[in-house]
Image (tube, grey):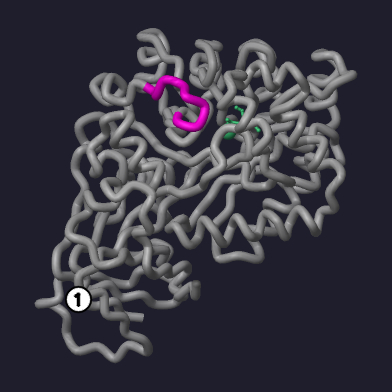
Amino acid sequence: MLIVNIKGLVQVREPGNHVLAGDAMATLPVLPDAYLAIKDGIIADYGSMSSLLVRHATQTLDATGRFVFPSFVDSHTHLVFAASREEEFVMKIKGATYADIAAKGGGILNSARRLQQMTEDELFERTLTRAHEIVRTGTGAVEIKSGYGLTVRDELKMLRVARRIGRETPLTVKTTFLGAHAVPKDTTQKEYIDLVIHDMIPAVAAEQLADYIDVFCEQGFFTAEETERIVEAGKQHGMCPRIHANQLHRSGGVQVGVKTKAVSVDHLENMGDEEIEALQNSGVMPTALPGAAFFLNLPFPPARQMLQAGLPLAIASDYNPGSAPSGNMPLMISLACIKMKLTPEEAINAATLNTAAALELHTTHGSITRGKVANVFITHPIPSVAHVPYAFGSPVVQDVILNGKTISN
Ligand code: NIG
Ligand code: FE
């Protein structure tokens, strides 16, 4: 396939390791008046239209007035869930906090009850609808967590659904075991942690259902010490940590992430100087989830301060029924610009190259690079790259190509 007359080809990079940190995040390479050649599902070539020799492409797509982006990599979602939670949304409007709702058996436990009652096939169908939804808004690779099962049977069920999404949709999927998301009712903290460590982790590993292990490190959920024990047990079974850290409090989650060599620490609404210092030169990807901060009316991560300290920053959606019921990555980029004062260039880098790094997909995804997977989207006709975050909530994606194939709407 050949895409021609592209107004701007966005995030063009030579092969190499492109985790972007600090000032480097401000630069987003855009090749104007360009073409892109795709062969066998891979980016074969690109260049400016003036250098395009006559080619015999089986399919040519005219992108006049439109930009071509690498597909977003969404490195944090809870895409597998049974049902939405509008009733809690209304409770929050009327003044209840996330913690109030959780304490009344709502929140994660509410989602777990509903998921436990659902068959694997039904759960798959519901997740498939969401998978198609995020494809249409420009996502090409996604991380999917468990954590609404909370029993061995139901955690495995969730992860099987997540793996099946990877097999049966064009999305590239990485999976994460998040058994330690909340402690079920009628179970002690100790009993549940034992179940996670001694039963769930080995069962998940035996079926090779998870690439990563996650813990909700938060007051009222799991302490930093418990988080460390759980992720160390996961590491013994080949699952690298990524951690829900510092969402509601300075929980110590960031420090545990650094200590256990997590691939990422996510949320970061409550950060101090110590956390920023701990992340410096750690190799851990700090990941902001602006949709969750927005939906829960929380402070946003101190992105500017983090970049000034030379840190990298990734942006993901956290798509889930409780704190972020949207997987719309263009909207996440808008929120990052508006609420975290990132420039469009910084936000786009954070949601492509840096999220690819956070999923260890940096050699195959996240940029327009010869040899990478041909995952791109083509915008509607728009005046500039900055229009994508500017036109918040408006549809910007017109055509989607994943693995070199056009996805019909
Ligand atoms: O990332 N914080 C923990 N987990 C999810 C929310 C889970 C829920 O409320 O269902 C999150 O925000
Ligand atoms: Fe989350």
The residue indicated by pointer 1 is 5
Q: Residues within 10 Å of mark 1 (few under 14, many from 20)?
A: many
Q: Which quadrant of the view contains residue 222? A: top right
Magenta span: predominant SS is loop
* Residue furthest right in the image: 186
In the depicted view, which residue is nearer to us: 324 or 200?
A: 324
Magenta span contains residue 211: no
Screen quadrant of the N terminus: bottom left
In the depicted view, which residue is nearer to us: 200 or 289?
A: 289
Instruction: Name the residue located 44 percent from the left edge and 77 percent from the top edge.
Output: 40
Residue 277's place in the image compared with 82, above or below, is: above
Tell whether 254 sits left or right of 344: right
Residue 265's place in the image compared with 166, above or below, is: above
Residue 377's spot in the image, x, y percent? 37, 64
Residue 304's spot in the image, x, y percent? 27, 24
Query: At numbered mark 1, what does the secondary structure look like: helix, strand or loop?
Result: strand
Instruction: Name the residue located 82 percent from the left edge and 36 percent from the top edge.
Output: 113
Q: Which residues are magenta?
A: 294-301
Residue 101's spot in the image, x, y percent? 68, 21
Instruction: Name the residue located 69 percent from the left edge and 28 percent from the top edge.
Output: 107
